Amino acid sequence: MTSTEQSKIARPGTGTSTDNPAAAESVFLDSTLQLLSPLEVMEGDVVVDLGPGAGSATVALAQAVGERGRVYAVDLDSTMLEATMTAARAAGVDGRIRPILHDLERGAPPVREPVDALWSSACVHHTLDWEASVRALARLLRPGGVLCLAEGGLPARCLPWDVGVGLPGLEIRLDEAHNRWSTQWFSGRAGARRPRRGWAEIMTAAGLTAVTSRTALVDYPAPLSDDVRTVVLDELAARVNRAKPYLHENDAAAWELLLDPTGAHWLGRRTDLALLTARTAFWGRAPR
């Protein structure tokens, strides 16, 4: 499927963490731009953005390729493609972007020309077979083209160790519960193949050379601006909601109090809420 006129085809388990992906992308934009830099996108290049979300990276790539270049925005969710094109129109670069509605499980996106650079953030890990997906993407590259996958980093830290509600270390235990949820989600799908090596090894096995990584720090110290605070609260709520079946009942009760905007313990009233995390991207080149 390649037309944005077709209906949404998203699978369970994919899509954005919150109802406002554009707000989240604005908070993480600086780190996105840092991770995009190894692509070395130049004017006139052909670029693919796989899983563009609300379009912040797509717009940056479209600005880099100039009027002679093209950016193929590929997603299995028509809503995200529409959001991407809305962002592109606002930035005046929509004429450089080609939206493609496509599910990577069906193979490589139908891009009919050699690709200079391919970027994907937090997308490929949704597929059933990471190695097959990376091989398919690598085949799109022209000789010397670059594949960059932002897949990894560190869990976010937003709260003090002891918030005064429940036992100390709530975020640490949330990480563990969320990992149990993600493991069950991944392995519970028919046909899922457990990845037994890291992204760098997967990319090397796909034939890419000089594979390495870069990590970008995301550091918003307290007190947070209203915009960042809203994103932090939304992201925490999304993580808690996914991990809820695996949380101890005492922790679940504590999170309910902390995320209730009508209650006395609501995190949105705290002045020590922060955002500290790191995002890692892996990249490699197609042999020349």
Image (cartoon, grey):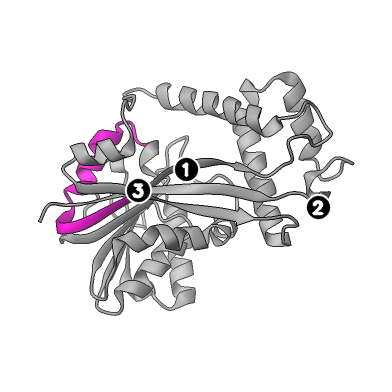
Q: Residue at x 55, y 59 (%)?
A: 22
How would you rate the neighbour count of disc 3 (Cα within 10 Å): few for under 14, some for 14-19, many for 20 or more? some
**Which of the two discs, 3 and 1, labels the residue nearer the N terminus?**
1
How would you rate the neighbour count of disc 2 (Cα within 10 Å): few for under 14, some for 14-19, many for 20 or more? few
- Measure how far apart labels 3 and 2 are at the Cα level: 35 Å
Q: Secondary structure at mark 3?
A: strand
Q: Secondary structure at mark 1?
A: strand
Residue type for callout 2: Thr
- Measure how far apart labels 2 and 1 are at the Cα level: 26 Å
- Measure how far apart labels 3 and 1 are at the Cα level: 11 Å
Query: Which dot, 3 or 2, sits closer to the camera?
Result: 3
251 or 205: which is nearer to us?
205
**Which residue, given by chain and number where applicable, does mark 3 sit on?**
213
Q: Is residue 181 visible?
A: yes
Residue 39 against residue 235 in the figure, above or below: below
**Which residue, given by chain and number where applicable, does mark 1 sit on?**
153
Q: Position of residue 187 (x, y in %)?
A: 41, 22
Judge from the rendering whether residue 38 lies leftward or rightward of residue 288; answer left or right: right
Q: Residue at x 72, y 58 (%)?
A: 224
Asked whether 252 falls inside the magenta stretch, the response is no
253 or 28: which is nearer to us?
28
Q: Secondary structure at mark 2?
A: loop
Residue 186 against residue 133 in the figure, above or below: above
Q: Position of residue 95 (x, y in %)?
A: 34, 75
